């Protein structure tokens, strides 16, 4: 079969590979739509996972079941399915302890385009099919389903990590697709005020549609100063970090109130340490919590998040700015994600 792969750090291209083999608990999927992610860009051009040779990229997609193993109960050949970017081993101790994303080691629930070939192939392999697939409802289009692989569950995980509650004032740093879903999830959780940080006009419009009430341009000066001014020196109840760099933590600690929580889903790609400002962290006694996490994955979560789309409570189509038709456009879509033109939110390829 054909696939679009990371050939080595900094190099991508089309390759030929064997169709993946199906174990007794697994499924083989033929993709219906796929989407490249900022994480694919980090994997290839920042070498975020270390060196990989001829590994098919991609972890956002949906498809049709082409083969199932003998133990798989709830899915059969021909079923249209969704699948999350994170596909844990649901029988692992880590999953039983509530951290399926770390089954097999820290972050090891992330298997696509990390420990095995990803979804940018003519077929892809899903482990633990009954735990990791969900039926794709007719009312969700394949391109919308791609957003349920990673952008929705990751952005919403930021909301869970920050523990957003009714009436909270929340700062969302970064309003690319992940941050936009953090804004949408924050709205659904009942925040009273959502301050969003970003500059791309498309993203600002989308953030407004998802419920952001105030905007901060990080290019106009210090984010913390701007947020303190907007809140009359009070700061915010919660911060969700979905963009920015290592300095973002200093900002988050400065603006969150005592008792507040910072939820990070951003990839930190540089340096050995991140800094926490001592005084603003209450000289160690400020009750300012910092939590970072990879999203959990799994069928139950996919079904629940999907039901937000089918009920009309969440419109993911706002994010789909660039649509392509045909497998051969995967390269173009990935390059868009790498170059991030200012009108881009998310590209998707329908196959
Ligand atoms: P984008 O690049 O589309 O968005 C990044 C956002 O951060 C933009 O709004 C950008 O603003 C803003 N930004 C850039 N620099 C700064 C800065 N210095 N200070 C404040 N804001 C800044 O990324 P994605 O939404 O696709 O992904 C966001 C992050 O989430 C990535 O690091 C990605 O790897 C990670 N991720 C994590 C996952 C997980 O499971 N934890 C899964 C998927 C992704 P502007 O409008 O100017 O572009
Ligand atoms: Zn992704």
Image (cartoon, grey):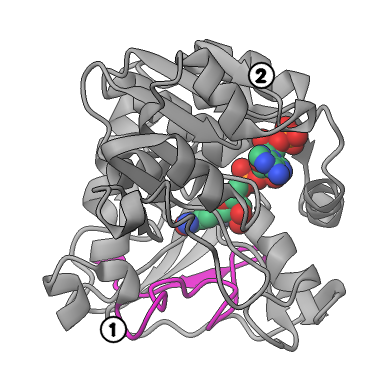
The crowding category of the residue bearing disc 2, from other C-alpha atoms within 10 Å (few below 14, some 14 to 19, many at least 20), is many
Would residue 212 appear left or right of 170 to someone viewing this image?
right
Pointer 2 with pointer 1, Cβ within 8 A: no
Above or below for 286 versus 205: below
Residue name at image x 28 percent, y 43 percent: 160
Q: State the residue position of label 1.
A: 24
Residue at (39, 44) in percent of width and height: 158
Residue 127's disc is: none
| Residue span colored magenta | 103-130
Label 1: how many residues lie within 10 Å, few (<14), some (14-19) or many (20+)? few
* Residue 335 picture location, percent across and down: 85, 53
Residue at image position (70%, 84%) is 17
Residue 345 visible? The answer is no
Residue 67 is situated, as x and y percent measured from the top left of the image, at 41, 70
Evaluate whether residue 301 shows in this view: yes
Locate residue 331, reporting x and y percent: 84, 57
N-term mark: 2 or 1: 1
Could you tell me residue 327's position as x and y percent?
Answer: 76, 54
Q: In the displayed orientation, state which residue is furthest to the left.
A: 96
Residue behind mark 2: 204
Task: Assess whether residue 311 is covered by the magenta stretch.
Answer: no
Taking depth in this image into account, of 335 and 303 the one nearest to the observer is: 335
Quarter of the picture holding the N terminus: bottom right
Residue 95 vs 171, above or below: the answer is below
Numbered disc 1: secondary structure: loop
Q: Is mark 1 within 8 Å of ligand 2?
A: no
- Taken as a whole, is the magenta stretch helix, strand or loop? loop
| 345 vs 123, nearest the viewer | 345
Q: Is mark 2 within 8 Å of ligand 1?
A: yes
Q: Is residue 73 left or right of residue 246?
A: left
């Amino acid at each position: 079969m054909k696939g679009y792969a990371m050939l080595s750090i900094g190099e991508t291209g089309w390759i030929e590979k064997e169709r993946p083999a199906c174990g007794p608990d697994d499924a083989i999927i033929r993709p219906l739509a796929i989407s490249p992610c900022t994480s694919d860009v980090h994997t290839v051009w920042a070498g975020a996972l270390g060196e990989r040779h001829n590994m098919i990229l991609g972890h956002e997609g949906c498809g049709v079941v082409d083969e199932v193993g003998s133990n798989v109960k709830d899915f059969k050949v021909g079923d249209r399915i969704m699948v999350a970017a994170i596909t844990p081993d649901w029988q692992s101790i880590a999953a039983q302890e509530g951290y399926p994303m770390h089954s097999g080691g820290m972050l090891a629930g992330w298997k696509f385009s990390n420990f095995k070939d990803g979804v940018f192939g003519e077929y892809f392999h899903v482990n633990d099919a009954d735990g990791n697939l969900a039926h794709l409802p007719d009312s969700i289009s394949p391109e919308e389903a791609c957003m349920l692989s990673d952008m929705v569950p990751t952005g919403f995980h930021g909301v869970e990590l920050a523990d957003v509650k009714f009436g909270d004032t929340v700062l969302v740093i970064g309003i690319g697709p992940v941050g936009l879903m953090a804004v949408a999830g924050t709205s659904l959780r009942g925040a009273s005020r959502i301050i969003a940080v970003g500059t791309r006009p498309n993203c600002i419009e989308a953030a407004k549609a998802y419920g952001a009430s105030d905007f901060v341009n990080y290019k106009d000066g210090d984010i913390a100063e701007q947020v303190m001014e907007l809140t009359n020196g009070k700061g915010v109840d919660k911060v969700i970090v979905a963009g920015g760099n290592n300095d973002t933590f200093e900002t988050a600690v400065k603006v969150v109130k005592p008792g507040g929580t910072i939820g990070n889903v951003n990839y930190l790609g540089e340096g050995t340490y991140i800094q926490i400002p001592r005084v603003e962290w209450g000289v160690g006694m400020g009750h300012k919590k910092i939590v970072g996490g990879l999203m959990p994955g799994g069928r139950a979560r996919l079904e629940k998040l999907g039901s937000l789309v089918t009920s009309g409570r969440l419109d993911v189509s706002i994010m789909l700015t660039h649509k392509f038709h045909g497998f051969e456009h995967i390269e173009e879509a990935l390059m868009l994600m790498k170059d991030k033109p200012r009108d881009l939110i998310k590209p998707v390829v329908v196959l």
